[in-house]
Amino acid sequence: MSDQAEGQNSSQSLIEALPDLAIDGGIRDAIARWLTEPSYADVRAQLEETVAQALGRAGEEARGVASAELEDAFSGPLPIGTGGRRGPCGAGPNRVNAALMRETARGLAVAMGDPAWGSDSRKVAVVYDTRESSRRFALVVAAALQAEGLAVTLVDAPRPTPQLSYLARVWGCGAGVVISASHNPPTDNGIKIYGPDGAQVLGQRDAKLMTAIVAAGEDPSALPAIDLDALLGGALPEGVERIAGDDLETRADGPYHGYVLAQGVGPASLGDSGLKVVYSAFHGVGQSSVVPVLRARGIEAIGVASQLPDEGRFETLRSANPEQPKAFEEALKVAREHGADLVLATDPDADRVGAMVRDAAGEYRFIDGNRLGVLMLDHLLGGLSKASAAELGDGRVLTTLVTSPLVARLARASEVEAVDDLLVGFKHHAGAQAEADARPLVFACEESHGYLRGNEIRDKDGAIAALLLTECAAADKAAGRTLFEHLAAIWAEHGYHKEKTANLYAHGMAGRRAIAAVMDRLRAEPPTAFAGLEVRSAVDRSAPRDAGSTTRDLPGNVLVYELEGEGRRCRLVFRPSGTEPKIKVYALAAGRPGLDEAEVAAQEQTAVDALIESVLADAAGFAESVMAAL
């Protein structure tokens, strides 16, 4: 008997047993389709194994876990969140697979034909990261888009997400696609969609795209057939332009690197600063962006050999996330060996950056995303005040409602307009950019280690951030101070600021219900206090608002509370994540400005830190109690 016949018999046996599964009948019907239709062949073996486990054929212990997996995997479609569509790879409409890539490509093609898309260009740029499945999914998307009549340019080597944003704009594309799951676990992958402005889709584009994707998913048999084996063998269809080899430098990398370098404000060469930098790409694509950019400015960043690309296995990391200090363990070994001043790391698609810094005592300490943004902006404001006062006068700083208020305070102190109430997700920064396209973007940031400068990229960029941080560290080294002493000087003038976030995870369908229950309870029974501080104002960002900006008025599932008591204030924010199974709780507070550094260290830090911990603990406890009661 042939392998194909054996596979058909195996699937048929499972289909006949599906009525024994204690799950929704609609889900059983969907599983049967995925076990038989050719569109889902790439994940059939995995699905057969899960169904067999759910039927108890692999033992009773695995039955419940497998049943829950099927219920969650087939409760789709996988939504578009703040970072596109991403999640675990596998079978089902709520998982990442070739079928999802094909239906997303069809949805994109349909959406691009709608006048609301805002572009007549029928060209799409595609890039991918270093995950094992990323190139395969990129080939599927490229072929599927070509079958829909679009011209596709595939950058056939792992490259950063922000580079796609830049290339989509300079190549005059109607859209761009990135295959990446950023710092998600190795089991995950995803797809990000960018519009003709080089930004992740927002507003009407987002709505049109999701409607078209859902329609494509309802009739997978209508999608063009794709020979994945032929694609992997190098047989790209006509209409797909492949950029590789020498063309990478001339057409893709060189122009992008040149643009990134133009965003700096420091000396042309940093080579004489004596600054030692260690850099890790966290097994991702950053070697192609951060390293050549720093080298062009005279910094030979010391690499972390154990964290070069490993097909997305992330073997040295529990989480490839530069927000997490523990992720720097390998890089710190190298830093201590070389006596480095600054340790930089980007996430696997190189759009975010994190840092560890050697303090005056020689110890390496983590600086969180809010404070990195404050340092970069202060460095920029100082550099531009000397070199480009015109940019400051006409420029803007963009940030979110959960990013440190110190960012906006610094901007306004330099008489630079600050927009500080954006929703989370850099697509909102990009939307605000588009509304004032002629004005220079001095700086944009968010607390989760995303930063940007300049108008020709419409997403956060780890290479630009790495350049600015390196410039700032070099300038501080020349001035005889550390980045921590730089922060202390800022706090003395503008007030000590502290921000902290709690991530409350809730997995699967039950988790989604639990997260929704928290937000529902907060809306149904508005709280009056947290940790002894009164709720002085509450804003539900899902409600209509009129801030005079289409982007700022966009609705979001976010609740914002301004707390006050005993002479102290604190902002508290509840927000379900758009890309991960968790609800995020943010607390942001500030001390008094105009103190000397000793007073800040002795009094304000202790008081504000304690306030943050108390408010966050009370808020997280409330959320956990609601989730546990379900």
Image (cartoon, rainbow, N blue to C red):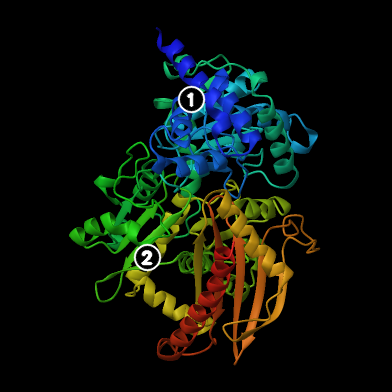
Picture quadrant of residue 204? top right
Percent x, y of residue 451: 52, 57
Numbered tag placed on residue 44 in the rendering: 1
Mark yes or no: residue 406 visible. no
Give the CA separation, mark 1 to mark 2. Answer: 52 Å
- Of residues 410 and 35, the one drawn nearer to the viewer in this rendering: 35
Three-letter residue code for mark 1 = Arg
Q: Position of residue 594 (x, y in %)?
A: 53, 88
Residue 473, disc: 2
Query: Where residue 22 appears, x then y in whole percent?
Result: 57, 39
440, above or below 531, in the image = above
Mark 1 or mark 2: whose residue is earlier in sequence: 1
Q: Residue at x 52, y 36 (%)?
A: 96
The residue positioned 68% from the left and 77% from the top of the image is: 527
Label count reads 2
Locate residue 415 relative to residue 595 in the image: left or right: right
Q: Nearer the viewer, residue 363 or 75?
A: 75
Point out residue 57 in the picture as x, y percentages from the top left corner.
Answer: 41, 32
